[in-house]
Amino acid sequence: MVRDGPPSLPAARRRLARTAENADADRRIRSAARRGNRLRRPAERGRSTHRALALRRPDARLRPADPRHRPGPPRRGRHRAPHRGRTARVARGDAVTPPRTAALTLYRHAPTDSNGAGVYMGSRDLPPMESGLGAAAAAAPRDGAEHFTRFYCSPLRRAARTAEVMFPGAAIEPDPRLAERSLGQWEGMAHADVRERHPEAFLPSGHLDPRFTPPGGEDLTAFLARTTDFLAQMDRLDRDERVVAVSHNGWIRSALHLAGSFPVEEIFAASVPFAVPVLIPLGHFAARADHPLGSRP
């Protein structure tokens, strides 16, 4: 029987309630869309998975719901289990042990008269200039004596005196491994005279070849061996140690080469500024202390 008159009051109330509910759901859907989520209208609840997906995709074919359909497990490869290796442990926030290394800071000594005269010094024991010591004291860290835990210097006067001025009151230990490389007969000679007498000692770039041993001088392999021996000792210190050492241009450049900063041919390609801190990365010198360093590329 079809009723032609207006709907009954209970039916109208039910329609009004559904309209209000759908309007409220529409507001929540629009709000969720702005947040990047999706909510389903009450009319969508209870429908099968593929039918709900069809409502999200207007271009999808709408198929009737299958009452026997039950969503199965996700297809293999769709949701991978978390990796159980090191990456997964880091992702879960587990503590990662930092490398056990101390911190090593190097300074080049204050300049001498020979530095400005263009003369090779090598292992000659020359004093620093007073003006250079003043500049070194001004460049020293303000709390250096309290910041560092160990103090070393080359036994040569220009380095030992610089260390005393930069870190007054500190217990500074002279270490012969920090001394500059001996240049034998070249010590005291002008750069131009050495180039004229020994052109084979220079690279095509014009820089001195560190692999060339001056007459009566120290072999590069022996020099790098004692340099590495000092660095390996720093490697074995506790990671809370903060070490500072005052040394020489050739020694610091060789330490940078051993740390991997540049190849051996570039040791004398540049000079380290006076009294400027140079940080040497530690962590691998102790493990390769017996490596044939003279053949390092």
Image: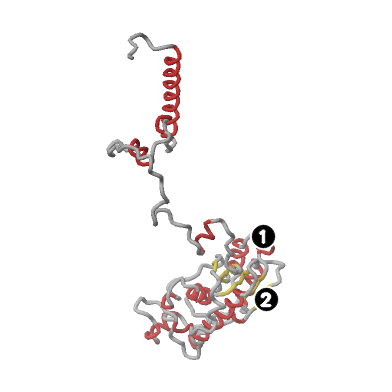
Q: Is residue 104 above or below residue 142?
A: below
Which residue sits at x=46%, y=87%? 213
Amino acid type assigned to the residue bearing label 2 in the image: Glu
Q: Is residue 70 above or below residue 254?
A: above
Residue 60 located left or right of residue 186? left
Image quadrant containing the N terminus: top left
Mark 1 — residue?
A: 143
Q: Position of residue 85 (x, y in %)?
A: 50, 64
Q: Quadrant of residue 46?
A: top left
In which image quadrant can residue 30 be found? top left
**Residue occupied by mark 2:** 173
Q: Which of marks 1 and 2 is nearer the N terminus?
A: 1
Query: Is disc 1 surrounded by few (<14), some (14 to 19) or many (20+) residues within 10 Å?
Result: few
What crowding class fits label 2: few (fewer than 14 Cα within 10 Å), some (14-19), or many (20 or more)?
some
Kindly report the distance in space between the C-alpha atoms of the residues bearing marks 1 and 2.
19 Å
Considering every residue shown, the one lying at the far bottom of the view is 216
Query: Which mark, residue 60?
Result: none
Which residue: 52% across, 56% down?
A: 91
Amino acid type of the residue that numbered disc 1 sits on in the rendered structure:
Asp
Q: Looking at the picture, how far across and down is residue 229, in whole percent?
A: 58, 81
